[in-house]
Amino acid sequence: MKWDDSSYRGITDKIIKAFYKVHDRLGPGFLEEAYHKALLIEISKDFHVDSEKGFPVIYEGKEVSKYVPDLIVENKVIVEVKAVKELNDTHKAQIISQLRVAEILIGFLVNFAKEKVEFKRFDNFYRIEKDGLKLE
């Protein structure tokens, strides 16, 4: 499924460039915190970024937990930073849940532990359809 994300491309393109820039400068081998802070610095050059802003998880009208994405860019894109051998289904479920709870449309899962930076984009199709955005 695809949707018209043209209004987000200016943000997502610069976020992706930031992934490459941080990886080029730091390389693999650091803990997640180093990449998180470096991305915060890099992306903040162009956009407003919230770091580790919590979103409540509500069940039957009561808060049962909080989801805390690593970075939220312009309240439009979540970036979840990893420094792991391999991205797995748990990481994917994490970003999908964060998108749902935060009601944000686009998220990136980025892994800096490899020789080349690895990232995957996730779209919140539940929210996209609810907002009536055009699906192709």
Image: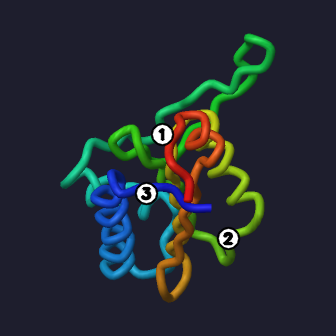
Specify the label residue 52 is tagged with: 1
Type of amino acid under label 1? Glu
Q: Is residue 33 left or right of residue 10?
A: right
The percent coordinates of residue 84 (x first, y second) are 63, 71
Decide which of tag 1 and tag 2 comes sooner along the chain.
1
Query: In the current view of this chain or complex, which residue is farthest to the top?
Result: 61
What residue is shown with label 2? Answer: 87
Picture quadrant of residue 103:
top right
- Residue located 27% across and 60% down the image: 42
Type of amino acid under label 3? His
Looking at the rendered image, the quarter that the N terminus falls into is bottom right
- Residue located 35% across and 57% down the image: 6
Figure label count: 3
Query: In the current view of this chain or complex, which residue is farthest to the right?
Result: 60
Type of amino acid under label 2? Leu
Looking at the rendered image, the quarter that the C terminus falls into is bottom right
What residue is shown with label 3? Answer: 36
The percent coordinates of residue 41 (x first, y second) are 27, 55
Is label 1 in a helix, a strand or a loop?
loop
What colour scheme governs how the chains and residues are painted in the rendered image of this protein?
rainbow
Q: Nearer the viewer, residue 132 or 89?
A: 132
Specify the label residue 117 is tagged with: none
Categorize mark 1 by other alpha carbons within 10 Å: few (<14), some (14-19), many (20+): some
The percent coordinates of residue 55 (x first, y second) are 57, 29
The percent coordinates of residue 91 (x first, y second) are 69, 59
- Residue located 71% across and 27% down the image: 65
